[in-house]
Image (cartoon, rainbow, N blue to C red):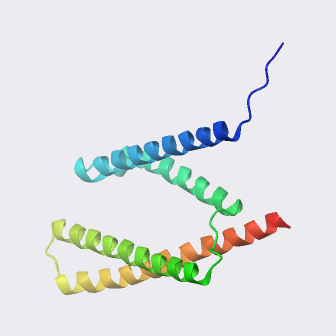
């Protein structure tokens, strides 16, 4: 006589939590591996591209499935929406500042002579484009996710 598996919500919740933690560990491990190979060891792209592609495919899959499932939802209260917008702008600004510092550091480490004015100007333009793209993409994901969540309710 075969026994049926227990479908207790606590058990399934714990399984989901463990899967989430294991994905996080794998993600961080791959990212550390990529950063070490690319920037510390300065390996050529062909030696770490496979790890980078694995990370990107996993993240893309997770993001697309989360949007289609309607998991990125706007808050119900207007005050919470305002806080979410503020957080979105702050995270976009922080990400673009990180990108700008990274690019300027990369320019400083280059072998040829650095034209600081040209470098700063191009990095500022790039940071503005990065900021607009970053915040726009986050809002697009939230809007799409809300649309899919509403469609699932119908």
When asked about the image quadrant of residue 5, the answer is top right
Instruction: Point out residue 138 in the picture as x, y percentages from the top left corner.
Output: 54, 73
Residue at 39% in and 84% down: 128
In the figure, 1 relative to 74: above or below?
above
13 left or right, relative to 85: right
| Position of residue 98 measured from the top left corner of the image (x, y, whole percent) | 32, 70
Residue at image coords 28%, 68%: 102
Image quarter where the N terminus lies is: top right
Q: Nearer the viewer, residue 34 or 67?
A: 67
Q: Is residue 50 visible?
A: no
For image coordinates 71% across by 59% down, the residue present is: 69
- Residue 110: x and y, percent? 19, 67
Q: In the rendered view of the protein, which quadrant contains the C terminus?
A: bottom right
Residue at the location (61% across, 75% down)? 140
Q: Position of residue 50 (x, y in %)?
A: 45, 45
Identify whether 106 is placed above or below 96: above
Viewer-proximal residue among 85 and 115 = 85
Query: Quick check: 68 left or right of 55?
Result: right
Is 112 drawn above or below residue 121 in the view shown? above
**In front of the other: 138 or 75:** 75
Q: How many marks?
A: 0
**Horizontal placement of 152 versus 144: left or right?**
right
């Amino acid at each position: 006589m075969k026994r049926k598996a227990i479908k207790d919500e606590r058990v399934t919740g714990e399984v989901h939590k463990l899967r989430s933690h294991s994905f996080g560990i794998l993600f961080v491990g791959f990212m550390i591996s990529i950063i070490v190979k690319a920037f510390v060891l300065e390996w050529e792209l062909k030696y770490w591209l496979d790890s980078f592609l694995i990370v990107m495919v996993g993240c893309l899959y997770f993001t697309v499935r989360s949007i289609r499932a309607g998991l990125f939802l706007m808050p119900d209260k207007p005050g919470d929406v305002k806080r979410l917008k503020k957080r979105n702008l702050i995270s976009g600004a922080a990400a673009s500042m990180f990108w700008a510092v990274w690019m300027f550091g990369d320019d400083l480490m280059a072998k040829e002579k650095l034209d600081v004015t040209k470098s700063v100007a191009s990095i500022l333009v790039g940071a503005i484009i990065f900021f607009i793209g970053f915040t726009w993409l986050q809002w697009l994901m939230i809007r799409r996710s809300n649309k899919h969540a509403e469609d699932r309710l119908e």
